[in-house]
Image (cartoon, rainbow, N blue to C red):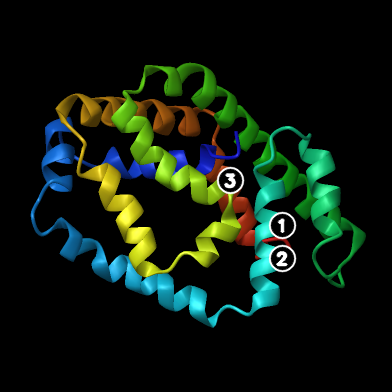
Amino acid sequence: MRNLIASLVFLVALYSFSEAKSVSTYFKDPKYAEKVEPVFTKIDALKSIMPDEYKKTFTSVFNLVFDTSKTPEVRFEEIRKLVPEEVQSKEDFEKKKAIIIEFMGKIDQLANYYTTEVAPTLTDNAKAVIKVYTDYIQQPQQFFKDGKDEMKKKFLDVTQKVENKDALDLFIAAGLMANKAKQIKIMDTLDKMKTEKDKTFF
């Protein structure tokens, strides 16, 4: 269920479209590949300047954050072993710990909702689109390994097959996930994390 966060981000992005049909039309635009080229170029450039040690740590931490098979408390303690300790008061540490555990707990809620309520309603093509994202979440090492052309090909291979029914499923799922995220106030938790400027764990 670690694939939840990528699915959430993608579905919420789709929700910005005015109607489902526009999603399939957008994906099938002859100039679509040209439009997304700069995105993959930027991703490639960003990956190229990341130190190998950072990539290794990022992969390990990322896997733990979204590993819903473990409790948030257990994941927090395992993450601590992977990152340098920062000098901070006990009060600050406990505050940050509570926020991070709260965030991972909400990830678990979203994962359960997506797996039990949303995913079963999607068409095969819709699932295939999301799978491109979720595969990189489940295997972040592959994200760093694949170059721009490989990533773009995987993406285009599935998005260009999207029909109106697939787009409708994605559009509805986007609304469901956005509403669930709002209901459990996950953005409030992310705002807390941003306020704390916790550079050690994220």
Q: Are marks 2 and 1 in contact (CB under 8 Å)?
A: yes
Residue furthest to the right: 90
Q: Is residue 40 left or right of residue 161?
A: right
* Residue 26 coordinates in the image, percent (x, y): 14, 46
Compared to 163, does 153 lie above or below?
below
Q: Residue at x 31, y 66 (%)?
A: 39
The residue closer to the viewer here, 93 or 165, is 165
Q: Is residue 178 above or below residue 187?
A: above
Q: Going by the image, does 25 lie left or right of 169?
A: left
Q: Percent x, y for residue 181?
A: 49, 33
Kind of residue at badge 1: Ser
Q: Residues within 10 Å of mark 3 (few under 14, many from 20)?
A: many
Q: Residue at x 84, y 71 (%)?
A: 86
State the CA–CA distance, disc 3 to disc 1.
11 Å
Residue 60's tag is: 1
Q: Does residue 198 appear in the picture of this structure?
A: no
Q: Position of residue 179 (x, y in %)?
A: 41, 28
Q: Secondary structure at mark 2?
A: helix
Mark 2 burial class by Cα count in 10 Å: few <14, some 14-19, many 20+: some
The crowd level at tag 1 (other Cα within 10 Å; few <14, some 14-19, many 20+) is some
- Tell me the amino acid under the disc marked 3: Gln
Mark 3, residue position: 138
The image quadrant that residue 174 belongs to is top left
Element under disc 3: helix
Q: Which quarter of the image is occupied by the N terminus? A: top right
Q: Residue 17: which disc?
A: none
Q: Secondary structure at mark 1?
A: helix
Q: Residue furthest left?
A: 30
